[in-house]
Each structure stands twice: as structure tokens, then as C-alpha cells.
């Protein structure tokens, strides 16, 4: 067999292997997520965590430039040698696809968190209504505790660097109850691509090749704790977006700092209100009347921020990411972000918020 066919065939083998792997979550959980990945992620964060800028973003910038340069170089020979060029492209994809999964993405196939934590996923409208009312009460309480004025929005007093460092407190408290959420060796950084990320409609991402958590540094600051905590959940091996939203909320509300608690509770409340707005406009309007005006001002702050960057670009990237998630064992795609409410409702049954 000619060498040029080896890597493209290996790509096909990988795709078939992943189709089979989804039936063995226990094996992925034991061998990969809690063993091999644990070692890989700790090594990468130990090496890159103290570097003040995003190494992963630099890597992506070099990669993008090299791809553009390569296409420019082969533009004149494309028609004559297109088969060889396609094989080279498939070969490169095969290598990165392999590294992507070995360094992080096998976590897509681990045991679902609701099984690991023995949490039910089903809930009734009555459950949702009761939980939303509890969230409103708790978020109102913290908003007033911070501002002493129910009409004042919360203004975050910490720097972005301080947020990253203080997030660990919440994770430490959470790990006392659930040891598998232990976070060690900080490697969370402001993304060098924050402007493009904003136009794409994303608050952050995990670089799977360097295990650095990247956060969009243009976000409203009250969103910073929950967004960075979400990306940190990816770092400790949870790939599902709904699970990372769930873990991110728990890590912020377990933090002793009220600003962090506000970030987590207000985030969960916004999703609950959004579900009611879709399900029942009347109930949504009744619930909204009980939310402090200051909280609604923070929501408006976020809405105004994203509206400034709202173009066809974010819709295109959301479509691509939706399909990316679906091909990586997340059948709900982008909708999976809101599915964390299932976990929240059932986790807090019989517990204090």
C-alpha cells in the first residue's frame, strides 16, 4: 500500500472505532477519563499554566496561517494534482483528529453525569415552577445583599485574573461533597481571539491540544465566574455542555463569595425563565414580576452586549458547532446547553439552594 493512503485510511478507522466506543462508557470512564486523561491534563496544565498568555491561541494562529499559506502555494497545481492534495488534507485531518481525541475528546464517550451522580433527568412543569420560584428568591436575596438596593444591577469588583484564581475556592468546596470535581493546577486564560469569539457568539472554549481554558475577556464581568467555571469543568474531563453548565453553576454557588454565587444563580435563573417564556408566556410574565429590577438590568446588560455583535457570523458558527456536538455523542447539539436545568432541578430536590 502506498504511504499516501495510510493516514486517510487511519481516519476512517478512527471514525469506525468511535462509533463502537460509544457503547463502552464504563471503559472510557475507567481507563481514559479517570486515568490516562487525568495524567495528560495535569501534565499540560503544569507546563503551560504559568505562561501568562494563551499558548493554544498562538498555536491556532500559526495553524491558520500555515493552512492559508499551503493553499496559496498549491493553487496552480490543484487541478493537475487534486487527488494527491486531497489525500494530504485527509492525512493532516487524521493526525489532528487522533490528537484531539487522545488529548481530550474521548471524554465525550464517558459515563453520563446523571448516572454517575444518580440524578434523575425527568421533571414536571410543577417541579420546574417550584425550582424557578426558589431560584428567584435566592437570586433576589444575594442581589440585595450585594447592592442593598433591589433596583441596582450588580457591578463586579474583581479583575479577570482574580476571578480565575478565586474560582478554585468554589471547586474546592464542591469537591468536598463530590471528589471527582476536584480541580488542580490552574490554567485559565483570556483568549487572544476574544473579538472573533464574540462575533461567533461564544463566551469561551477549551483548547483540547494544550488543555488551556480560554475565556472571552469582553464579556460582562458578572458573567465571568460562571463562564470560566464552565470551561474549567471541561478541563477536569467533562465534555458534555449541559454537564459543564451544571458543574459550573455548582462551583460558583459553592463559592463563599456572594458575587460568585450571584453569577451562578442568576445564570441558572435566566435559563429557567427562558424555558417558561417558550412554554407559557403568562407564567413567564408572572415570574418576571417577582425578579428584582437589578437582576433584570444585568440580564439587559448581557443582551445589549451580544446584540452589538449579532451578525450572520454567529448563526453560521452555531450551526457548525451544533453539528460538531451531534457528531461527538451529544445528540441535542446546541440545545444541550439548556439541558443542565434537568440536572439542577433533580439535584436540588430536598436540598437548600
Image: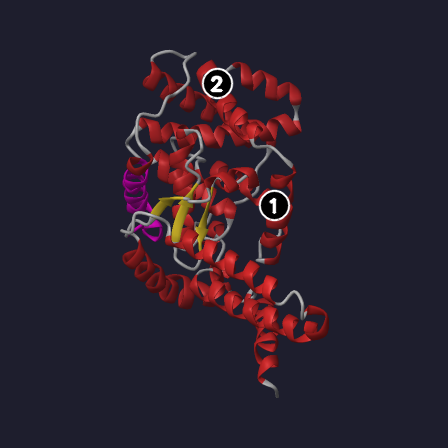
- Circle on res. 48: none
Q: Where residue 251 sits: x, y (%)?
A: 36, 40
Q: In the image, is 195 to the left or to the right of 9?
A: left
- Whether the magenta-drawn stretch holds residue 181 is answered as yes
Asked if one can make out residue 332 in the rendered structure from this viewpoint, the answer is no
Task: Say if the magenta span includes residue 66.
Answer: no
Question: Could you tell me which residue is drawn at 68 percent across and 74 percent down?
Answer: 81
Quadrant of the rendered image containing residue 237: bottom left
The correct choice, above or below, for 272 with respect to 3 in the image is above
Q: Position of residue 96 (x, y in %)?
A: 51, 66
Q: Quarter of the image containing the C terminus?
A: top left
Nearer to us in this view, 334 or 6: 6
Boundaries of the magenta span: 163-184
**Image coords of residue 112 (percent x, y):** 49, 54
Asked which secondary structure carries label 2, the reply is: helix
Mark 1 sits on what residue?
A: 317
In this rendering, position of residue 55 left or right of residue 65? left
**For this rendering, which residue is in front, 270 or 133?**
270
* Residue 170 position in % (x across, y down): 31, 39
Quarter that holds the N terminus: bottom right
Amino acid at each position: 500500500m502506498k504511504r499516501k493512503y495510510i493516514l486517510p485510511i487511519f481516519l476512517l478507522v478512527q471514525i469506525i472505532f468511535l462509533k463502537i466506543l460509544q457503547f463502552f462508557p464504563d471503559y472510557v470512564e475507567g481507563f481514559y477519563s479517570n486515568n490516562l486523561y487525568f495524567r495528560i491534563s495535569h501534565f499540560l496544565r503544569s507546563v503551560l499554566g504559568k505562561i501568562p498568555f494563551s499558548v493554544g491561541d498562538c498555536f491556532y494562529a500559526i495553524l491558520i496561517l500555515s493552512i492559508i499559506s499551503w493553499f496559496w502555494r498549491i493553487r496552480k497545481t490543484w487541478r493537475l494534482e487534486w487527488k494527491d492534495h486531497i489525500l494530504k488534507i485527509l492525512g493532516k485531518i487524521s493526525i489532528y483528529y487522533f490528537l484531539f481525541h487522545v488529548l481530550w475528546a474521548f471524554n465525550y464517550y464517558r459515563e453520563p453525569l446523571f448516572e454517575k451522580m444518580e440524578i434523575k433527568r425527568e421533571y414536571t412543569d410543577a417541579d420546574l415552577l417550584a425550582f424557578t420560584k426558589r431560584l428567584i428568591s435566592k437570586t433576589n436575596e444575594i442581589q440585595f445583599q450585594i447592592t442593598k438596593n433591589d433596583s441596582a444591577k450588580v457591578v463586579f469588583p474583581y479583575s479577570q485574573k482574580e476571578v480565575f484564581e478565586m474560582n478554585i475556592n468554589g471547586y474546592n468546596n464542591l469537591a468536598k461533597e463530590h471528589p471527582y470535581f476536584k480541580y488542580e493546577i490552574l490554567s485559565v486564560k483570556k483568549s487572544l481571539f476574544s473579538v472573533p469569539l464574540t462575533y461567533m457568539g461564544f463566551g469561551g472554549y477549551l483548547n483540547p491540544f494544550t488543555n488551556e481554558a480560554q475565556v472571552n475577556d469582553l464579556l460582562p464581568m458578572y458573567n465571568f465566574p460562571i463562564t470560566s467555571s464552565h470551561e474549567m469543568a471541561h478541563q477536569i474531563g467533562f465534555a458534555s455542555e449541559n454537564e459543564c453548565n451544571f458543574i459550573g453553576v455548582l462551583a460558583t454557588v459553592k463559592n463563599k463569595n456572594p458575587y460568585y454565587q450571584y453569577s451562578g444563580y442568576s445564570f441558572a435563573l435566566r435559563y429557567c425563565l427562558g424555558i417558561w417564556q417558550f412554554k407559557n408566556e403568562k407564567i413567564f410574565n408572572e415570574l418576571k414580576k417577582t425578579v428584582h429590577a437589578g437582576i433584570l438590568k444585568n440580564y439587559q446588560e448581557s443582551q445589549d452586549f451580544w446584540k452589538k455583535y449579532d451578525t450572520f457570523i454567529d448563526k453560521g458558527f452555531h450551526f457548525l458547532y451544533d453539528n460538531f456536538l451531534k457528531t461527538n455523542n451529544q445528540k441535542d447539539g446546541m440545545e444541550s446547553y439548556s439541558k443542565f436545568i434537568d440536572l439542577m432541578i433533580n439535584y436540588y430536590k430536598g436540598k437548600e439552594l
